[in-house]
Amino acid sequence: MNFIKAGTDANGNDIKLFYQDLGTGNPVVLIHGWPLSSAMWDYQLAELPKHNMRVIAYDRRGFGQSSKPFDGYDYDTFADDLKAVLDTLDLQNVTLVGMSMGGGEVARYMSRHGGARVSKVAFVSAVTPYMLKAEDNPDGVSHKVFDDMKDNINEDRAAFLQDFSKQFYGVTLLSQPASEAHMQGDFTRTYQASHKATLDCVDAFAATDFRQDLPKINVPTLIIHGTGDKVVPVEASAERTVEAIPHAEYIAYDGAPHGLFYTAKDRLTSDLISFVQQSTGVHQSTDDLPTGNLPGSTSAIDEVTQPGVII
C-alpha cells in the first residue's frame, strides 16, 4: 500500500496518509467528504484515468487507512497534509477536487500555501464559505444541529452513521437514490475512522470560516452542488461561494442530494473530465463531449451559469 508521511503526532509517531495513484497525464487530486474515505471516489477512480489523467485520492488523517492521531483535526493541519501529498509526489499543474468537507481543504490550501502547484480547483457539495449560522451569516446552519450531531455520535456512532447515510443520499420512503447495499458499504468505510476524528471534524467543518480564503483563489474554478442537498444547503454554500469567487462557474444539479458523487456519478465524472481538459477557465458543457466519451452517462446539463451568475 502507498503512504505519505505528513508530520508526526504528539508522541513522535509518523502520521501516514494512505493514497491511491492511478493513470498518467494531468494530475487530479480528489479530497473526500466526511465521514467517508477516499473509497467514496470509486466510480471516478475507475473512469478519470481513462482520459489522460493521473488521479490521486488519499484518506484524510483519522479516516480510512490513514494514521489516526488523537488530535490535529483542524483545517490548517489538513491543508498542510494536502501540501505533503502534492510535495511528496512532486505534482504540478494540479486540479484539486474537494467534496463537502474536502472543499474546505481546497480553500484553506489555496490561501495558506498560495495555491502552489495548483492550476484549477473544483468544489463539489462543499462546506464553503461558512456553515455556521451567525448575524453576518443568516443562511447558515444552527449551532444546535452540529451539537446534536456530536451528541448522537457520542451516544451511538454506528447508529448515527447509518441514519446519516440516508440523509446524505436523500433516501426517503418515496425516494431511493442509493441502495441499501451501497449505504452498508459506506457504513463499513465510515466506521474505519476513529471516533475522535469523526467528532472533531464536525467542529472543523461547522465552525471554520473560509470567507477570507476564497477571494484568494485566482485559478479557474468550478462549483457543483445539488439543489436538494439537505446536509450542506445550497443557499448557505454554493450560492455564497460563487459570490466570493466571481470568476467561478457554477453548475447546479437539480434536486440532487449531498452525495451526488454516487447519485449523479456519470454526470459528475463527465463534468470533471470537461473541466480538467479545458485549456482555459471556460467550462465546457458535457453536451459538447464526444458521444460515447463516458459510457452510460446521462449527464446533460440542466442549468449552467456563466461566471458570477447564481442559479
Image (tube, helix red, strand yellow):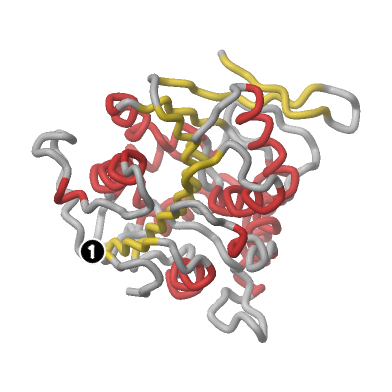
Residue placed farthest to the bottom in the image?
135
Residue closest to the eye, 65 or 249: 249
Residue closest to the eye, 225 or 256: 225
Residue depicted at 63% across the width and 68% down the height: 211
* Side (left or right) of 4 relative to 33: right
* Side (left or right) of 104 relative to 171: right
Locate the C terminus and report the quarter of the image it occupies: bottom left
* Side (left or right) of 111 relative to 189: right
Residue placed farthest to the left in the image?
291
Residue 223's spot in the image, x, y percent?
Answer: 41, 58
Task: Identify the image quadrant of residue 301.
Answer: bottom left
User: How many numbered discs?
Assistant: 1
The answer to whether residue 159 is visible is: no
Label 1: which residue? 174
Residue depicted at 61% across the width and 80% down the height: 137
Residue 38's spot in the image, x, y percent?
Answer: 50, 34
Residue depicted at 22% across the width and 53% down the height: 285
10 in relation to 140, above or below: above
Q: Secondary structure at mark 1?
A: loop
Residue placed farthest to the front in the image?
280
241 in relation to 7, above or below: below
Residue 16's spot in the image, x, y percent?
Answer: 70, 24
Residue depicted at 17% across the width and 43% down the height: 289
Task: Identify the image quadrant of residue 239.
Answer: bottom left
Residue placed farthest to the top in the image?
1
Q: Residues within 10 Å of mark 1 (few under 14, many from 20)?
A: few
Locate the N terminus and report the quarter of the image it occupies: top right
* Side (left or right) of 213 relative to 256: right
The answer to whether residue 102 is visible is: yes
* Badge 1 amino acid: Leu
Residue 204's spot in the image, x, y percent?
Answer: 69, 56
